[in-house]
Amino acid sequence: MPPATRPVIDIRALVKRYGHGDTEVHALRGVSLTVERGEYVAVMGASGSGKSTLMHILGLLDAPTSGTYRLDGTDVNGLDEGALGLVRNRRIGFVFQSFNLIPRTTAYANVELPLTYAGVKAPERRRRTAAALAQVGLSDRADHLPNQLSGGQQQRVAVARALVTSPALLLADEPTGNLDSRSTSDVLDLFDRLSDLGRTIVLITHEDDVAARASRVIRLRDGEILSDTKTGPEVTRGAA
Ligand code: ADP
Ligand code: MG
């Protein structure tokens, strides 16, 4: 399929079990799902419903017990660690609840790092790092260290770092979970803008007002999809 029409995510019958025997946990019990380019999806569900497990598999941080996963057209099931690392670096941008910035390292250097890993040459690195910081509205904070930035600003640096490689998929696990309401609103506005620009976003949250910004809401319960609802941006944007 040509790149513009194939799904970014295509998972079939995904099962994940942890442990064995008496302690065995069925974290995912056969999840099938496609996410098209440009969709903004919120994954919701109670604690223990399998959200993080799904995110780790989607992010190639963990392998399913069974089932298939095509990411942006690539069948990732057969790939070894080295190949998985490459796909992860090039096609996925991660945003975590705890920001995960490198301490004592400037915002600029944090954002530039994935490009260095990807072997991008210095002039192109500078151009793309500056553009990513501008996109999140932090050009004037490039020289700041993480501990000199507010939580909201740190998370925007993390979003810039996630975007700098132009990944096919932006994966965010509770990205506003550590933020106050003002910073939450800044970060969600940023996701709205990225979505408007055509980014594909999968965001995990347990907060309804965060999920309400997405154009599609998937609810998990006990490792299964309970519901999958497309809301459409015209319904959600500015509705509150
Ligand atoms: P959520 O993110 O929705 O809270 P998780 O995906 O973290 O849910 O967990 C789903 C289920 O799998 C839970 O019962 C959890 O205790 C279990 N689980 C998650 N990770 C592990 C692990 N590494 N080892 C054993 N059980 C796990
Ligand atoms: Mg979780």
Image (cartoon, helix red, strand yellow):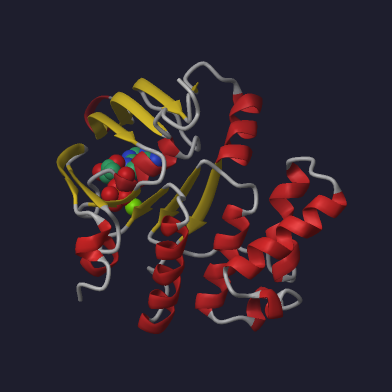
* The image quarter in which residue 31 lies: top left
Percent from the top left, x then y, of residue 151?
Answer: 51, 77
Percent from the top left, x then y, of residue 122?
Answer: 86, 52
Q: Where does the N terminus fall, quadrant-wise?
A: top left
Counting the numbered discs, the total is 0
Q: Is residue 47 above or below residue 2?
A: below
- In the shown orientation, is residue 107 left or right of residue 154? right
Residue lying at 30% horizontally and 59% vertically, measured from the top left? 205
Quadrant for ligand 1 reads top left
Percent from the top left, x then y, of residue 43?
Answer: 28, 50
Along the line of sight, which residue is nearer the eye, 234 or 229? 234
* The image quarter in which residue 137 lies: bottom right
- In the shown orientation, is residue 58 left or right of residue 15? right
- In the shown orientation, is residue 125 left or right of residue 197? right
Q: Is residue 204 above or below residue 2?
A: below
Residue lying at 35% horizontally and 46% vertically, measured from the top left? 39
Q: Where does the C terminus fall, quadrant-wise?
A: bottom left
Percent from the top left, x then y, of residue 215?
Answer: 27, 54
Along the line of sight, which residue is nearer the eye, 200 or 210? 200
Return the residue found at the far top: 78
* Residue 179 visible in the shown view: yes
Residue lying at 55% horizontally and 69% vertically, measured from the top left? 156
Residue lying at 43% horizontally and 54% vertically, measured from the top left? 172
Return the residue found at the far left: 226
Q: Is residue 195 above or below residue 91?
A: below
- In the shown orientation, is residue 154 left or right of residue 5? right
* Residue 100 visible in the shown view: no
* The image quarter in which residue 47 lies: bottom left
